[in-house]
Image (tube, grey):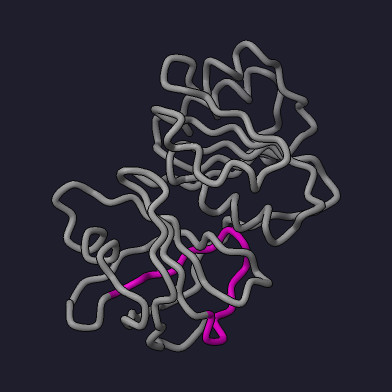
Amino acid sequence: MNKTKKYKVISVRNISKTAFVLRLERNGFSFIPGQCATVGIPEMATNREYSIYSGVDDNYLEFLIKEVEGGVISSKLRGLKKGDKLTVNGAYGLFNLGDLSKKYMLIATGTGIAPFHSMVKSFPKLDCKILHGIRSSEEEYDKDDYKNYVACLSELRVSGYLKKHKVDKNNVFYLCGNSEMINDVYDILREQGVNGSNIHSESFF
């Protein structure tokens, strides 16, 4: 685990009305794609946990963050300027890929796609399909970074897509996002014959 350090802000990139990508100097921070870190503002006593968005070989550290209405930390982070400093602790978590030679289906809702972006950036030869449950096309965050990306808009939903498109039960599945999606998708995958040991999940809420 990295020691607590202060990291300078490089940029804040707004990618929708509510979401932004916070880029910090790398400053020697080490992590495994899929892990998260806690980000804090030095003059405040609180911090928040976010999945790492950048690739393991990038010379910067990125986080995909959704600004929460009335949220103290997310609003403050969105308003940061180049050169401002933050504290970062971590990395944490075991939501990491196994055998990279296998085929993967990575299923997310909203900003739950963040760890998958890190995985794809870190392992460009990874054979994977991304299913992304979103409310509108505005939430297709950096979709051009993925070779096989399917947006599941609110009227279709991820679960609806999977019911219409039977999966390869030999794939490995990673689920990240809200707990309702994870529970629904887990049940659908099991019904389609996927072994529970091939389903990995991380719930945001």
| Residue furthest to the right | 101
Specify the segment rendered in magenta.
26-40
Q: Is residue 50 magenta?
A: no
Quadrant of the frame with the C terminus: top left
Q: Quadrant of residue 64?
A: bottom left
- As displayed, is residue 119 above or below residue 137? below
| Residue furthest to the top | 164
Q: Is residue 38 magenta?
A: yes
Instruction: Name the residue: 64% across, 37% down.
Output: 130
Front in this rendered view, residue 137 or 34 = 137
Q: Quadrant of residue 136?
A: top left
Front in this rendered view, residue 11 or 188 = 11
Total residue callouts: 0
Instruction: Name the residue: 26% across, 59% down.
Output: 74
- As displayed, is residue 55 above or below residue 70? below
Where in the figure is residue 155, as x and y percent of width and height? 43, 15
Q: Please indicate whether residue 80 sits to the left or right of residue 140 in the image.
A: left
Front in this rendered view, residue 170 or 155 = 155
Where in the figure is residue 178, as x and y percent of width and height? 40, 38
- As displayed, is residue 69 above or below residue 79? above
Q: What is the chief secondary structure element of the magenta stretch?
A: loop
Where in the figure is residue 120, as x and y percent of width and height? 68, 53
Instruction: Name the residue: 70% across, 32% down.
Output: 195
Instruction: Name the residue: 50% across, 37% down.
Output: 140
